[in-house]
Amino acid sequence: MSSEEIIIDGPLARAARALCRISAKEVSSRADLKKAELKDYEKGREDLTEQQEHRLLEALEEYGARFVRDDSNGGYGVRLKFNRAKVRAIERWEGEGGMAADDDV
């Protein structure tokens, strides 16, 4: 992979899922994977196809993960899409009442 591509491997996927506080069941469902496939991938026991990795990356990004590219400043990694202040604001907005609806966070 070139340094311009986002690198995702099992441990990074597991870290992203932990940061976003999302279960393996939810992520695997969103990424169209079997839960066992995801767990084995996270533990380094199984490889995913390029298409499966892409779906997994997109699913984790939908839950708020941002993947950091490998560059001269440091290695690849994962961080949260929103900082703590934005998360608190979003939680406050969601707690204001009204009808529950899907959001893109």
Image (cartoon, rainbow, N blue to C red):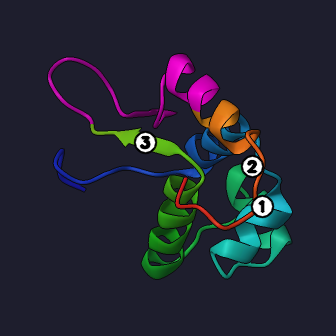
Q: What residue is rendered at 68% in x and 60% in y?
A: 41
Earlier in the chain: of badge 3 and badge 1, it is 1
Numbered range of the magenta stretch? 70-89
Relative placement, left or right, of 96 versus 4 is right
Frontmost of labels 3 and 1 is 3
- Mark 2 touching mark 3, by CB under 8 A? no
Write down the residue under mark 3.
66
Q: For mark 1, does the 10 Å Cα neighbourhood hold few (<14), some (14 to 19), or many (20 or more) residues? A: some
Q: Does the magenta stretch include residue 75?
A: yes
Residue 1 spot, x, y in % from top left: 25, 56
User: 92 or 84: which is nearer to us?
Assistant: 92
Count residues near mark 3 (Cα–Cα under 10 Å), then give few for <14, some for 14-19, many for 20+: some
Query: Where, by quadrant of the figure, is residue 50 drawn?
Result: bottom left
Asked whether residue 44 appears in the rendered view, the answer is no
Badge 2 local density, few (<14 within 10 Å), some, or many (20+)? some
Left or right: where does residue 67 sit relative to residue 22?
Answer: left
**Is 84 covered by the magenta stretch?**
yes
Q: Mark 2 points at which residue?
A: 43
Q: Is mark 2 on a helix, strand or loop?
A: loop
Q: Which amino acid does label 3 sit on?
A: Arg
List the residue tagged with mark 1.
40
